């Protein structure tokens, strides 16, 4: 039996035992990671360089892309390195840093998605008040609130989790340091304090999700009053995928953090965690740029400028 003071490192879950499958995992995650880097990087560059995109909607989208890059960079590279070098080790401090950054970024991202739903609601349902409700100062304050709330949430969870005595070994049954898997290593009833904090955080997240859904309900009702099938198609084709990804994120995250131990298994936990931690950062750039002509035009202009400068 070991306690917290004697643990110098943790052992992360390997995706596979055979060398071939480990390399397959490496190349699969590398492809997803590069796609996320490219997609989010292009969005950040286009919004930063094109003054026509300096509006509240694109300001929030810029923040979302930064958070997506941070989220996927916190978990995926370490897992890729472990598969490539056939190792499972992560240092104690590295595990704590990974847990803190992941909770910080994923919390801030969800709060930002809530703000973005509010932005779309005001733009479509209350367009005359848009400039008043979402001025530049208000946008900065809302984005800062999302980042600040995520930071505070991560501080509380990290401090609570790593203050627990750990006496059930150092094997984390996940491909990165996730709170529920660290709690499994605790031998003290004080872990219930962290469970209570998780339930509170997820209650807040569920409240945000209800707000997002209600915002889109109002948006859909407003759009359906417009006698334009093109407007309907554009709104539904952009809003429904966004709502689908948010729903996937909330449902899988709540399942991962609240499921009873009786239905827990390594393969199930792995799939659920990939769905809420890896998939959204990779698909968000596609969802937010797929039907966005302004963003597409900005990317085309940026590409032309780069090509002509090289020539």
Image (spheres, rainbow, N blue to C red):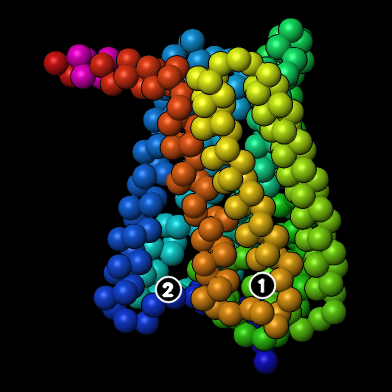
Q: Quadrant of the C terminus?
A: top left
Whether residue 94 appears in this view of the structure is: no
Residue at left 45%, top 46%? 282
Residue for badge 1: 182
Q: CA distance from mark 2 to mark 1?
A: 18 Å
Nearer to me, 65 or 246: 246
Q: How many marks?
A: 2
Image disc number at residue 15: 2
User: Which residues are the magenta region?
Assistant: 305-309
Whether residue 32 appears in this view of the structure is: yes
Which of the 4 image quadrants contains residue 163? Answer: bottom right
Relative vertical location of residue 295 with respect to residue 190 in this rendering, above or below: above
Q: Main secondary structure of the magenta part?
A: helix
Relative side of 190 to 30, left or right:
right
Relative side of 232 to 88, left or right:
right
Q: Secondary structure at mark 1?
A: helix
Residue at left 45%, top 57%? 76
Q: Position of residue 64 (x, y in %)?
A: 57, 35
Please tell me which of labels 2 and 1 falls first in the chain: 2
Relative vertical location of residue 180 with respect to residue 226 in this rendering, above or below: below
Image disc number at residue 295: none
Eye-nearest disc, 2 or 1: 2
Label 1 environment density (alpha carbons within 10 Å; few <14, some 14–19, many ≥20): many
Q: Position of residue 273 (x, y in %)?
A: 56, 63
Nearer to me, 6 or 41: 41
Q: Secondary structure at mark 2?
A: loop
Relative vertical location of residue 5 with respect to residue 309 in this rendering, above or below: below
Q: Position of residue 224 (x, y in %)?
A: 65, 23
Relative side of 167 to 201, left or right:
left
Residue at left 49%, top 10%? 52
Q: Quadrant of the N terminus?
A: bottom right
């Amino acid at each position: 039996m070991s306690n917290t003071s004697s643990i110098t490192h943790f052992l992360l879950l390997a995706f596979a035992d055979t060398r071939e499958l480990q390399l397959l995992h490496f190349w699969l995650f590398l492809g997803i990671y590069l796609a996320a880097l490219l997609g989010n990087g292009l969005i950040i560059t286009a919004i930063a360089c094109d003054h026509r995109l300096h509006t509240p909607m694109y300001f929030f989208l810029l923040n979302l892309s930064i958070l997506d890059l941070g989220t996927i960079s916190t978990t995926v590279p370490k897992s890729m390195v472990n598969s490539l070098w056939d190792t499972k080790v992560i240092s104690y401090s590295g595990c704590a840093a990974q847990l803190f950054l992941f909770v910080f970024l994923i919390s801030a991202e969800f709060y930002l998605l809530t703000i973005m739903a509010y932005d779309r609601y005001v733009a479509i349902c209350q367009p005359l008040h848009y400039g008043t409700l979402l001025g530049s100062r208000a946008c900065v304050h809302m984005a800062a609130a999302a980042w600040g709330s995520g930071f505070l949430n991560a501080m509380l969870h990290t401090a609570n989790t790593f203050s627990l005595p750990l006496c059930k070994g150092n094997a984390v049954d996940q491909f990165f340091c996730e709170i529920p898997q660290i709690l499994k290593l605790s031998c003290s009833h004080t872990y219930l304090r962290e469970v209570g904090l998780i339930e509170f955080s997820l209650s807040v997240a569920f409240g945000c999700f209800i707000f997002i859904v209600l915002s889109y309900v109002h948006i859909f009702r407003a759009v359906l009053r417009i006698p334009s099938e093109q407007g309907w198609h554009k709104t539904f084709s952009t809003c429904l995928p966004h709502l689908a990804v948010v729903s996937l994120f909330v449902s899988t995250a709540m399942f991962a953090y609240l499921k009873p131990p009786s239905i827990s298994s390594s393969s199930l936990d792995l799939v659920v965690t990939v769905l809420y931690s890896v998939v959204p950062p990779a698909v968000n750039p596609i969802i937010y740029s797929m039907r966005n002509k302004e963003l597409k035009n900005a990317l085309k202009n940026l590409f032309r400028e780069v090509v002509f400068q090289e020539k």
